[in-house]
Amino acid sequence: MNKRLDHLNLYPFEKLNKLIDDVTPAIGQKPISLALGEPKHSAPSFLIEAYCDPIAITNGFGTYPPTRGIPKLREAIASFVSKRFNLSQEINPDTEVLPVNGTREALFAIAQVVINGSGLTLIPNPFYQIYEGATILAGSATRYIPCKETNNFNPDFSEITEAEWRDCSLVYLCTPGNPSGSIMSIEDLQYVIMKSDEYDFTIVSDECYSEIYSATPPPGLLEAASAMGRDDYKNCLAFNSLSKRSNLPGLRSGYVCGDSNILDKFLLYRTYHGSAMPVQNQWISALAWQDEEHVAVNRKLYTEKYEAFLEIIKPVWPMQQPEAGFYLWPKTPIPDEEFTIKLLSQTNVKVVPGSYLAREVNGVNPGANRVRLALVAELEQCVEAANRIKQFFKHLG
């Protein structure tokens, strides 16, 4: 048995389930979950119609899917990335793109490729727990970088010592950030790229919330590299998916783009890993990446929910709409676990304690006394949740 498995931490939602196992939710109120970041908007109808094509389904079921991806999908992804991130030189669909089964499996798998059983991995704190698990099972040590409010909830790389940079094999970035929705600037991304030039480590940028924003499209890692004249994207890999962008979490479809040398090795790994996406899913994915109209509609729905929720809640619980994503990351007036339990018992609204999304380092957990609220439910439910929370605060005193 792999002994590293014993070092994996309990997943946040398993910890949440244990926390509330003995809690009796408010009687007479339907449950509303703001805990899981699972999009609830309807999948685009044109994709559903296309997916029901019996010829496409028959052909897909009767074909072993290519791990490299069908040309139509790779071309659609390359076109999307090149246009969306203002690249001076278009992504090569044959060498700089790999379709993946959602970002989750790929963000885990890439660590097994680029980490050579040692070294150091830098992870933002709070973070998406897949980064940590991937690092542990690849045999790397982990350096958690606190994402403090004073740094706009972005990782402060000035804290990293030269010795740590020298020992670094991999850096995970998340922009827009989970859970804060913060956006790393072009300059911040270029700082990490320059460090990679100096110390030769891989940069993995998780950009799965990039298409849910309030005003200006967030920049990406490849955009930052391109602006530096780095059209080979050396050591740079950007990950994205259709889960949030297109409300297709069940399709399990995403991409990784960037350094062709790393992707060549990643493809080799994936041919053994058995992670090829079904052909019918690849075909539908290509259609999704080629359409922007449904994405604009999706953004509008989140904007409406933010406006309605915050109008109700801000008089009793100060918080701001983030730059991107669909989360809120407010402070709690009492410890986050206690807040979560009381909120559920009195309102039947479920949230995630912020401390479950982070790690304590030097006695400080940057998620402590915060909670994450996912505005993924329909507008009516989000408004109902806001009204219940408002009443909860009045009784909280």
Image (cartoon, rainbow, N blue to C red):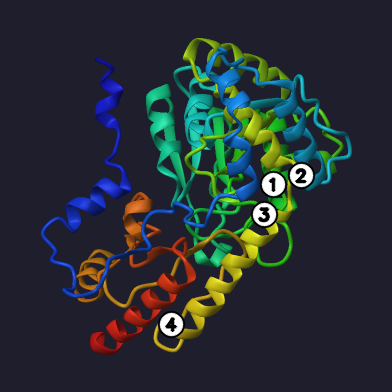
Query: Mark 3 to mark 2: distance in Å?
Result: 23 Å
Which residue of the protein is positioned furthest toward the left in this rendering?
22
Image coordinates for residue 316, horizontal then vertical, percent? 39, 87
Which label is found at residue 189? 1
Residue topped by disc 4: 313
The kind of secondary structure element at disc 2 is: helix
Q: CA distance from mark 2 to mark 1?
A: 6 Å
Q: CA distance from mark 4 to mark 1?
A: 34 Å
Sequence-earlier tag: 3 or 2: 2
How packed mark 2 is, by other alpha carbons closer than 10 Å (few <14, some 14-19, many 20 or more), is: many
CB under 8 Å between discs 3 and 1: no
Q: Where does label 3 land, which residue?
A: 295
| 146 vs 130: above or below | below
Identify the secondary structure beneath mark 4: helix
Q: First in sequence, mark 3 or 1: give its number.
A: 1
The tag earlier along the polypeptide, 4 or 3, is: 3
Indicate the quadrant where residue 139 lies.
top left
* Mark 3 surroundings: few (<14), some (14-19) or many (≥20) residues within 10 A: some
**Type of amino acid at the residue the image marks with label 4:** Ile
Nearest the viewer among 3 and 15 is 15
Query: Which amino acid does the dot numbered 2 rest on?
Result: Ala
Q: CA distance from mark 4 to mark 3?
A: 27 Å
* Mark 1, other Cα within 10 Å: few <14 / some 14–19 / many ≥20: many
Circle 1: residue type: Leu
Q: Which mark is residue 224?
A: 2
Q: Residue at x 45, y 45 (%)?
A: 128
Residue 188 spot, x, y in % from top left:
69, 51
Q: How many marks?
A: 4
